[in-house]
Amino acid sequence: MIEIRFHGRGGQGAQVACKVLADASFREGKEVQAFPFFGVERRGAPVTAYTKIDDRPIRVKSQIYEPDHVVVLDESLLKSVDVANGLKDGGFIVINTVKDPQDFRQRYPNARIATVDATGVAMSHGLGSKISPIVNTSILGALAKASGIVTIDSIQAAIREVTPRNKEENARASLDAYNNTRTWEDTNDPSGGN
Amino acid sequence: MRKVVTGNMAAAIGAKLCKPDVISAYPITPQTTIVEYIADFVADGSLKTQYVKVESEHSAMAACISASNLGVRTFTATSSHGLLLMHEMLGWASGARLPVVMVNVNRAIGPPWSVWVDHLDAIMQRDTGWIHIFAENNQEVLDSMIMMYKICEDHDVLLPGMIHEDAFYLSHTSEPVDIPDQSKVDEFLPKYKALVKMDLDNPLGFGSLVMPDNYMEFRYKIALAMDNVREKIIEVDADFKRLFGRSYGGMLDLYRCEDAEYVLLGAGTTASTVREVVDELREQGKKVGLARLRVFRPFPYEEIRKLARSVKAIGVFERAFAFGYMGPFMAEIGGALYNTDIRIPIKDYIIGLGGRDVRTKHIHAIFNDLEKIANSGKLDKELKWFGLNDGNRPEEEM
């Protein structure tokens, strides 16, 4: 089983993100389970959402405590939330930030880091407002690129199915983010990575 | 067609497939999206129904009762405090012998305020004369709706029924659900034919006063109808399997109980997690099983007696507490076994109230505890509030 934990803030779309990832994996023949941890629904409040992916039906109905990968939709959460809690060794932390992966190396020594300016990508595609950009579809592109657990094609197909509006802009944003995702390996390989 | 949907979407699709003539509901977290999805279906024309907007759950149930009295199929959905507000009308639906069907999203009763799963809202409706079915996954939410109409509308039954789905663990959890073809559902569930209905050309009295020399017989007939539900559930489950390929075990859903020495018994999504742990323990050679309390009313006392004859100990897990006594399921099971010669230890584990996460490690700890009881034949105590925070012990410690 592959387990993904999303950390975001109310209004950024973590709830839709966990569902899009599940739908994308389902399209690739996987069994899935996705759910948000429903806190008090307030814009800006920290939210957590989960996606489980497996080859057989998923029966355990509990939250994710030892994720394979973690997705952080808002960099400011790193100050208040221990996003790496329980993360399996070698798992990715995919962060929405303008910074480079190596800027987070010291803080998360056991994790692999991927970064993407999901806010910038979302804004360039007109998703949300400057105060409240909708970054969920962009960061899913980054997760697909870094982890390889699902193809960008499936992510785009799922976005067209699941997102309530701006389907094409969201699909394009995910691809744009996919192409602009940086991992520590990329940025430290003299040949340019890949 | 298999699709990834939430429990609430499964419920809304279930409503669409069952084609109720009248739907009336009032939104409440975490049921709200059921109301919203149905509104979308009505707006886009894919569901032809009279959608009655009301100012409360009490009125929603009153609207369903009135419509059902006219001989049409009705549906509503609610949760927690909304269900409690309906309580008076629930008794009317069963007393008037109306096959209203409802989905209730199990949510805790406040205060303290909580929107998360707890089964007390359902338990508090135990004696209203409704059929109660607890779902384990989103597929079962949808399938149970189709089966529930078939059971409730049977002329040997004519009682209302509610399907319970756990807040968030089903209502807002997306998982693959096989959505049956409309033509198959139509074949399985023909249009409702009322035995008696309000008709201006054939006026009858409804809900009128009866004197003490008649009231008791009306109650007795509800009791008989509820007894008829037992065989109908088994029959409809078998029919459903023939047409749709899925079965839910009839009155009591037994999993790996054939040669089990000790089993856990309980309802809702926790049962799904228990299933996983049963498989893990079976791999280690432990003879464990799960008895899922799918049907709460009518209560499967005969099935539980049969199970209790074949095992050394039963652990009951429940997301509710009946204040002043013990867990509600435990009380019922004790009652079912008393007038028999069965004397096995039964322990009650109160767990996961108000949406507290129930993990596989918790179920392992409970099975460990139960194994000791099964092997020694001795019960240390009848009741355990599992995982209470006392500040210094890890929650899985017994």
Image: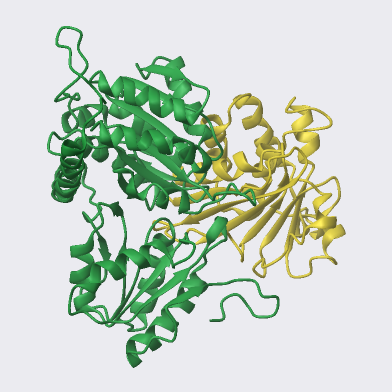
Q: Is residue B257 left or right of residue A128?
A: left
Whether B286 is drawn above or below A40: the answer is below
> Residue A53 placed where, x, y %?
50, 55
What is the display colour for chain A? yellow
In depth, the one of B18 and B157 nearer the eye is: B157
Decide if residue B10 is in sight here.
no
> Residue B96 placed where, x, y %?
25, 31
Name, please, the residue furthest toward the bottom. Answer: B376
> Residue A146 placed where, x, y %?
67, 53
The quadrant holding residue A165 is top right
Whether B391 is drawn above or below A130: the answer is below
Whether A72 is drawn above or below A111: the answer is above
Q: Is residue A137 left or right of residue A185?
A: left
Whether B369 is drawn above or below B84: the answer is below
What is the display colour for chain B? green
In depth, the one of B333 and A179 nearer the eye is: B333
Name, please, the residue furthest toward the front. Answer: B212
In depth, the one of B218 and B3 nearer the eye is: B218
In depth, the one of B137 and B350 nearer the eye is: B350
Q: Which residue shows up at 79% across the image and 27% down it? A: A129
